[in-house]
Image (cartoon, rainbow, N blue to C red):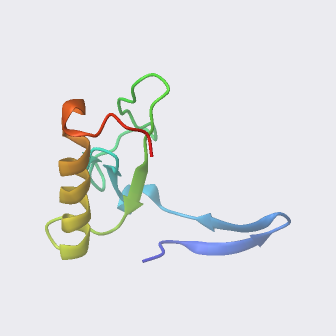
Amino acid sequence: MWIGQAVNASKGWVAAVDLSQLNFFDLYSGRLICSAGSCGGGALSLSVEAAGFGAVLATTHTADSDKELRELLMTMRNLTGRNDRHFSKSKS
């Protein structure tokens, strides 16, 4: 769902979005960062290991009301919560 209005700018499309309506998830770890209306002054905080990867998902959906989002977050939490010894040492 798109919140706000898309505007055609000179270098592509830009969206005017009301951030207070969005839930922010640390997609890599599958966890909620902050929910709509509680994110504070426009800055998000999450931990990323040195030279690591991270991803933030902003959506109007909640894990409670959206089954596909809940399943995605659970999958990511299960994948990234594993200890390194569970993965193969071989490079593919």
| Residue 56 percent location from the top left of the image | 41, 49
The quarter of the displayed image where residue 47 is located: top left
Specify whether residue 66 is in view: no
Q: Is residue 67 above or below residue 35?
A: below
Residue at 45% x, 22% y: name it. 50
Specify whether residue 73 is in view: yes
Please identify the residue farthest to the right as the structure is shown.
10
Residue at 24% x, 31% y: name it. 84
The quarter of the displayed image where residue 19 is located: bottom left
Q: Could you tell whether 41 is left or right of 9 in the image?
A: left
The quarter of the displayed image where residue 20 is located: bottom left
Please identify the residue farthest to the front as the structure is shown.
90
Residue at 77% x, 68% y: name it. 12
Q: Could you tell whether 58 is left or right of 38 in the image?
A: right
Q: Which of the pair 52/15 is nearer the observer?
A: 52
Q: Is residue 52 above or below residue 10?
A: above
| Residue 39 percent location from the top left of the image | 33, 44
Q: Quadrant of the N terminus?
A: bottom left
Q: Which of the pair 40/2 is nearer the observer?
A: 2
Residue at 59% x, 65% y: name it. 16
| Residue 43 percent location from the top left of the image | 45, 36
Please identify the residue farthest to the left as the structure is shown.
64
Q: Is residue 64 above or below residue 42?
A: below
Q: How many marks?
A: 0
| Residue 85 percent location from the top left of the image | 20, 31
Q: Could you tell whether 47 is left or right of 64 in the image?
A: right
Q: Which of the pair 52/23 is nearer the observer?
A: 52
